[in-house]
Amino acid sequence: QRLSNVTLKSLPASVQRPIYDRTAVTPGIVHLGIGAFHRAHQAVYTDTVLADGDDRWGIVGASLRSTDTRDALAPQDGLYTVAARDGDGERLRVVGSSIDQLVAPEDPEHLLETMADPRVKVISLTVTEKGYCHSPSSGDLDEGHPDIRHDLAMPGSPRSAIGFIVEAVARRRAAGATPFTLLSCDNLPANGRTLKRVVTRFAELRDRDLGSFVADEIACPSTMVDRIVPATTDADRQTVSKSLGLTDAWPIMTEPFSQWVIEDDFPAGRPQWEAAGATFVSNVDPYELMKLRLLNGSHSTLAYLGYLAGHETVSDTMSAPGFAVLISGLMDEEVTSTLPQLPGIDLSAYKTDLMARFSNPALRHRTWQIAMDGSQKIPQRLLNTIRDRIKAGAPFARLALGVAAWIRYASGVDEKGAVIDVRDPFAAAMRRQAESVTSPTELASAFFNMEQVFGTDLPREQEFRSAVEAALAQLMRDGAAATVTQVISP
Ligand code: NAD
């Protein structure tokens, strides 16, 4: 039997479930990109708000790409399980906040009508870094992006998240409805400001008035989001369905930890997410810097080095010789000094927690998954930290090793000579670059020419070039496992 409204009552008593009347819930949020992370994070906070009795915040989720999430969730009335796992066991919660699932390419008009519904007050997004159609190093809209060119030519049937948002803004404006708030929940620096910049520019390119309207009227609070959510495997589907006694076609695996820090700028109103543990602040920047640099910077470094050393998951990598020492050294010696003081945050406790979270044996978070889209992630996770270290005249060997490991990985062939399935908007170009060079120095130089990633400043820093070149040469000569043990005991 399938998980659904009707079968909910047969769940074992230990499984948390929606105890509110789901038929009374009305749409208040449209979420673009209903992937695993959204379903383990924002949807869970919203589920608590609905359970507290405020039924105005049902989530209509939209996928801008594939039909898979809708196909899995629609037959189960949008219900799915979140399994929070660590070494001590597993807690299951069935989440009821997703009230409808749309597939944008099938019917863009239906999604636009829903976004223009005056009851909708928040449009939230997890569309991955590349979904913003911007240059990660400058933050500007990529005006030559094929989806952006399409959406400017055909604004009424968009493809990109940016195109949908701006068309929905235009329709609400024409109908005299209050503007919605845009809430980016992706791992981008200043995610709200970045989103505002690209939507404003896109609107301007459509029509100057619409550009001014977006600039003046659309609030885009920034957020810091944190919960580790690996992709679900078939084995996960089976074990969760067995525990439920019902089939769940797409449960979500995660850790017990969850954090959400949000700038409190919602002119049209918002759910009381603080009741579910979210923190509202006036400026999210310091929290975001802490998270991008400590968590995501370490995660990417572990992913590239771990993958190259032959480890499938982050926790396997953490238990291999030298890696845990490397990562705690990276955080303590190279990242911490670049972070501002945060009242109420104990950075050493935060770092201790991170080491435990990375080592969580119950989360099979694949190094390959985190390695994806490196060209979009490396700037905010590692390169900006390096910029601060250079300014301070401080060393950054471990960060440089992380960057070199990305280059080694993105060149597309592993240490045994096998092809790596590199998923990245620049995968093909990076592979070609790698094939056209003969030495680590040339390989590094070819990558440094990617202005979207390195900007124009870093490639001019001799210290940066030498550190990355040396680490890359060592990786190519000795392999990742030996390089890590050498770096921690020079
Ligand atoms: P996922 O693969 O489960 O889902 C990705 C979603 O993004 C899908 O809905 C997909 O259709 C959509 N998407 C991909 N490319 C797109 C594009 N170009 N335009 C529009 N939509 C696009 O991945 P996930 O685990 O849900 O992660 C999504 C994002 O959430 C990450 O990129 C990151 O910014 C953020 N995040 C994830 C985690 C995590 O642990 N998984 C933690 C913090 C933040």
Image (cartoon, grey):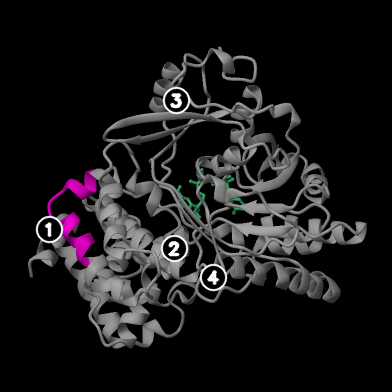
- Identify which amino acid the numbered label 1 is placed on: Ala
Say which residue appears at 61% left-offset and 70% top-offset.
193
- Regarding mark 1 in the picture, which secondary structure is present there? helix
- Identify which amino acid the numbered label 2 is placed on: Lys
The answer to whether marks 1 and 4 mark residues whose Cβ atoms lie closer than 8 Å is no
Task: Indicate which disc, 1 or 3, sits on the residue closer to the N terminus.
Answer: 3
Say which residue appears at 22% left-offset and 74% top-offset.
397
- Identify which amino acid the numbered label 3 is placed on: Arg
Residue range (magenta): 316-329
Residue 237: assigned label: 3
For marks 4 and 3, give the one nearer the viewer. 4
- Residue 444: which quarter of the image? bottom left
- Regarding mark 4 in the picture, which secondary structure is present there? loop
The answer to whether marks 4 and 2 mark residues whose Cβ atoms lie closer than 8 Å is no
Mark pair 2, 3: CA separation: 29 Å
Residue under label 2, please give it.
377
Residue under label 4, please give it.
283
Task: Indicate which disc, 4 or 2, sits on the residue closer to the N terminus.
Answer: 4
Mark 2 Cβ inside 8 Å of ligand 1: no
Estimate how packed mark 3 is, as few (under 14), some (14 to 19) or many (20 or more) residues with alpha carbons within 10 Å. Answer: some
